[in-house]
Amino acid sequence: MQKISSTTKEYEVKSDAFLVSKTDTKGKITYCNPPFIDIAGYSEKELLGKPHSIVRHPDMPRIIFKLLWEKIQRKEEIFAYVKNMSSDGGFYWVYANVTASLDKNGNIIGFYSVRRKPNPKALASIKPLYEKLVSIEKNSGIEASLKYLNEFLKEKGVSYEEFSNNLQRL
């Protein structure tokens, strides 16, 4: 699959839409619903079996995905703001809830994510934070990005989840 260049075209998640996808334990898409397919701009066939990173936007800080993977590997859910990229290079913001799918013995068999429209007021705080994190990652690496994020959250007296949930409720 050829590399897609990001553009400034923004798509808005409908207020009543839930974008749902499921992946295997390696992050390959095993299910995606029509609203996800529509906004991503791919066919279902183009998405199934592909890494979920097919919709990853280069403006997303790697540290957010590191936190996400750490949480879901511990069978904890996470809520996070994510900027995704459509097949045409456009983008869309989501407020994602990601959790592990477990078998009857409690073993992780995959992951699922339900995403919805983010609170526009929240993005006013998220966008500059993510821009700063990406800049730090480019110049100093992911550990420096984590340090900055931890200091930012400590100053606010909240975890990332509390921070993101509080923003969504603005």
Image (cartoon, grey):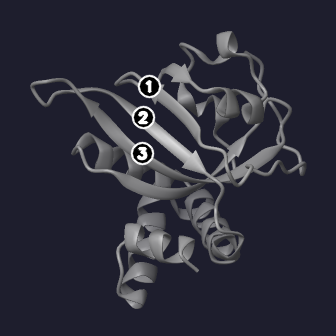
Amino acid type, label 1:
Thr
Q: Tell me which corner region of the image, top left, top right, bottom left or bottom right, holds residue 72.
A: top left
Camera-side residue of 14 and 144: 14
Q: Mark 3 touching mark 2, by CB under 8 A?
A: yes
Quarter of the image that includes the N terminus: top right
Tell me the element at label 2. strand
Q: Mark 2 points at which residue?
A: 112
Q: How many labels does the image show?
A: 3
Give residue 23's mark: 1
Q: Circle 2: is it few (<14), some (14-19), or many (20+) Cα within 10 Å? A: many
Instruction: Measuring from the top left, give residue 168's x and y in whole percent.
Output: 55, 70
Tell me the element at label 3. strand
Amino acid type, label 2:
Tyr
Q: Earlier in the sequence, mark 2 or mark 1?
A: 1
- Work out whether residue 51 can be spotted: yes
Quarter of the image that includes the C terminus: bottom right
Instruction: Measuring from the top left, give residue 160's x and y in whole percent.
Output: 41, 69
Q: Earlier in the sequence, mark 3 or mark 1?
A: 1
Residue placed farthest to the top in the image? 45
Q: Which residue is drawn at 41% across and 61% down?
A: 143
Tell me the element at label 1. strand
Q: Is 105 on the left or on the right of 21, as rendered?
A: left
Please, is residue 8 above or below residue 150 in the view? Answer: above
Q: Mark 2 touching mark 1, by CB under 8 A?
A: yes
Give residue 133's mark: none
**Cα separation between marks 3 and 2:** 6 Å
Q: Name the residue under label 3.
A: 98
Camera-side residue of 114 and 162: 114
Instruction: Measuring from the top left, give residue 48's x and y in whole percent.
Output: 57, 14
Q: Which residue is drawn at 69% across and 76% down?
A: 121
